[in-house]
Image (cartoon, rainbow, N blue to C red):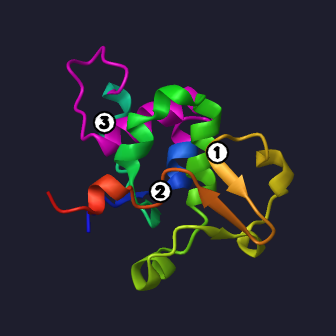
Amino acid sequence: MYNSMFLYDWQKIFEVAEGNPSTIFRIFKMMATNQIPVNKYDKIYNFSHIKFIGGSFLAHPDVLLYNAYKHSFAEIAQYLALASVRPLADYLATGKTDLDLQLLEVDINFFTENSLLCIKDTSVTFLYEEVPKEKTQWH
């Protein structure tokens, strides 16, 4: 199975970005692609010396990045925020990528317009967290 697990510290990213969705995306992209700044004027320079690794995870950050142009920075920031609530232990033990609504401490109605999320009766499914079929087939 293809594995590109991405670990991040949502709280730290949010605080450093001061809640700005485009800055959150910039930090996420820098981490997920292992970008390094070109020079001290590069927009990621100030973030490149900070460790953002933590206990939150994305199973397929590459798929989210590949499709990022289809979504707003705010939607991506919400996606990262909700994904950070999922227990890593559940994913490692069972491969579970959805989020049980009972784990949320916020009103889920705030996220209903997000095209990256599918909210059902008891859980939130993340659009790009399911294993893409082309990544599981042998070539």
* Label 1 with label 3: CB-CB less than 8 Å: no
Using the image, determine if residue 31 lies above or below residue 69: below
Q: Earlier in the sequence, mark 1 or mark 3?
A: 3
Q: Secondary structure at mark 2?
A: loop
Q: Which residue is mark 3?
A: 48
Q: CA distance from mark 1 to mark 2?
A: 14 Å
Q: CA distance from mark 3 to mark 2?
A: 15 Å
In this rendered view, identify the residue nearer to me: 41 or 66.
66
Instruction: Classify the position of the N terminus by image quarter.
Output: bottom left
Q: Residues within 10 Å of mark 1 (few under 14, many from 20)?
A: some
Residue matched to label 1: 78
> What type is the residue that disc 3 sits on?
Ser
| Cα separation between marks 1 and 3 | 22 Å
Does dot 3 land on a helix, a strand or a loop?
loop
Residue range highlighted in magenta: 15-44
Q: Which residue is mark 2?
A: 9
